[in-house]
Amino acid sequence: MSTVLPPAPPGVDTILARSWALFKRGWIVALPPFIGTVLIMTCVIVYVLALATLGIVAVAARHSETLSPALLGTLVIGYVALLILSVLVALWMYAAMFGMADALWERGTTSLADGFTAFRTRGGALFVAGIGFIGLAILAVVLALPTLGLALLAFPLFTMYAVPAIVSGGRGGFEAIGESFRLVRSYFVPSLIAVLVLYGIWYGVSFLGSFAIVPLEMATLPDRPGDVTFRVPPPSLIVGAGVGYVISLVVSIAYSGFVAIGLTGLYRELTGRAAFTEAAAPPSAVLPG
């Protein structure tokens, strides 16, 4: 009797190479994080400016440093609205990004329409998963000290397939988290390698912004020891540091699209292999009663 063995899955390097090829063809998958970041930052800036303006007007009109109950209520309502809007934008951003990534693996092309479809159909499950993420993050922080920080490192590893499971696999929020844990346990080594590569590069790209800021900080330090007067950096250095930081921020946001493609591809590969293994397994023998 011959035993059917599942095909050996491609290595992480192969999947990431395919992901890069898809990202170059479908770079539009990086648009949702750009749009989401701009929307959230714009709303925050508008709220802060409105807060400052209303505070100044109220203090000047009443000649008092305390705000009226009506104005305070308006500010609280505005903050709650900003919080709700930020959550909705974040849900759309992740749903759209991973929905477009799944479409790239499925048919080789994608558009923002795939992102809106993913948000409409999987946004609720993503919200439920977000509640689970918050609970797991709190647990990881609590266990950080007794586990010597391993709990903080395990959190992104064991939840890496949760969002692809929701968007690509159609799982519920908590169900997706459970599936992510099972996949990581079953394929621990490739999952660990993928996390180290994807998030290691992401951290490195984000860290590049500090190289643009450090010279600016050094230029503000006093000339002589004991001097408490900080210097004003030359305008060219200020502009250069700002441009460098913005470039690192743009690259970091764009790279998140590649991360979505890579995680989605790895999830599709591993779940396909798991399904093949279950289908090829012989049925359990039934003992007579």
Image: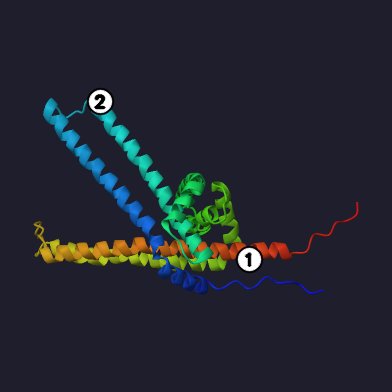
How far apart are the two marked residues, 1 and 2, measured between alpha carbons? 60 Å
Label 2 neighbourhood size at 10 Å, few (<14), some (14-19), many (20+)? few
Asked whether, in this view, residue 49 is left or right of residue 36, the answer is: left
Quadrant in which residue 284 is drawn: bottom right
Q: Earlier in the sequence, mark 1 or mark 2?
A: 2
Between residue 4 and residue 187, name the one nearer to us: 4
Which mark is on residue 273? 1
Can residue 31 be seen by looking at this rendering? yes
Residue 267 against residue 53 in the figure, above or below? below
Report x, y in % for residue 119: 46, 49
Q: Which of the labelled discs sits on residue 34, or is there none?
A: none
> In this view of the protein, which residue sits in the foreground, 37 or 73?
37
Residue found 35% across the figure and 41% down from its top = 83
Which residue occupies 38% across, 55% down?
A: 32
Three-letter residue code for mark 2: Ala
Corner quadrant of residue 26: bottom left
Task: Report which residue position mark 2 lands on.
Answer: 70
Question: What residue is drawn where x is 57% and y is 61%?
Answer: 184
The reply to whether residue 148 is in sight is no
